[in-house]
Amino acid sequence: MGVLCDTQIRDLVEIKPYAEAQKRDGTISYGVSSYGYDVRVGTRFKIFTPTPRGGGLAVVDPKRFDDRFMVEVDTQDADGQDGRPTDHVIIPPNSFALCETVETFTIPRDVLVICLGKSTYARCGLIVNVTPLEPEWRGKVTLEISNTTPLPAKVYANEGIAQLIFLKADKVCEVSYADKAGKYQDQVGLTLPMVD
């Protein structure tokens, strides 16, 4: 099993919109890199609040996740100090946010994708978590960003957030994510946990 390089990523993986790596002053980097692809976080976020809207004490249950724990924010709609849309969201201390990538992916049948957070955010105590993207998975990636600090943390929309590493198998899998009709196939936006 080998890691795809920049030219192989460009040729073998469908990424829309695709961005070449280039220096972008004042922006957290994104686009293809030597052996990966740095994805951008979109403008829509669901930020975890420990007390659900409507009150009451609750437990986070992955089998019955309560959407009342989440406050939805779209930076295109949010008012900045000047009354215009803002370029960031604030994640509360010791909390997390779900968000989606700007990019949509179609993963080849012989490729597995691992996601790692960018060092710019990791060095600020923000950790990005994504399960592997399986062969023939398609859609926008739902990311989880954890703020491990005791302070509020800023995340910038439409800028780099994590790097995808593409591992090409020596042999094609017998059953792909598409074959088993995975529950997160073709997700187009922010998707909360689901249990079949």
Image (spheres, rainbow, N blue to C red):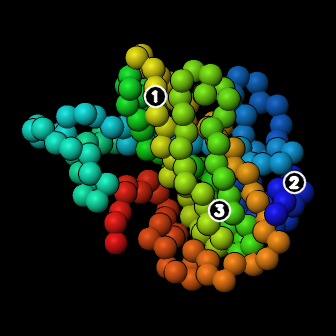
* Amino acid type, residue under disc 3 in the picture: Phe
Viewer-side label of 2, 3: 2
Measured in 3D between alpha carbons, the distance from the residue under mark 3 to the one under mark 1, in whole angstroms, is: 26 Å
In this rendering, would 15 be left or right of 161? right
At 78% from the left and 69% from the top, the residue drawn is 169
In this rendering, would 186 be left or right of 152? right
Q: Is residue 181 visible?
A: yes
Q: Identify the secondary structure beneath mark 3.
A: strand
Q: Earlier in the sequence, mark 3 or mark 1?
A: 3
Among the 4 quarters of the image, the one containing residue 48: top left
Residue highlighted by disc 3: 105
Q: Earlier in the sequence, mark 2 or mark 3?
A: 2
At 12% from the left and 38% from the top, the residue drawn is 57
Q: Residues within 10 Å of mark 3 (few under 14, many from 20)?
A: many
* Amino acid type, residue under disc 1 in the picture: Asn
At 62% from the left and 66% from the top, the residue drawn is 134
Q: Quadrant of the C terminus?
A: bottom left
Q: Is residue 112 above or below residue 122?
A: below
Q: Position of residue 137 (x, y in %)?
A: 60, 69
* Amino acid type, residue under disc 2 in the picture: Cys
Outermost residue on the right side: it is 7
Q: Position of residue 92 (x, y in %)?
A: 37, 25
Residue highlighted by disc 2: 5
Q: Quadrant of the N terminus?
A: bottom right
Q: Position of residue 79 (x, y in %)?
A: 39, 28
At 75% from the left and 45% from the top, the residue drawn is 31
Looking at this view, is 140 or 88 the one in front? Answer: 140
Q: Position of residue 181 (x, y in %)?
A: 49, 79
Q: Are marks 2 and 3 in contact (CB under 8 Å)?
A: no
Looking at this view, is 192 or 149 the one in front? Answer: 149
Residue highlighted by disc 1: 147
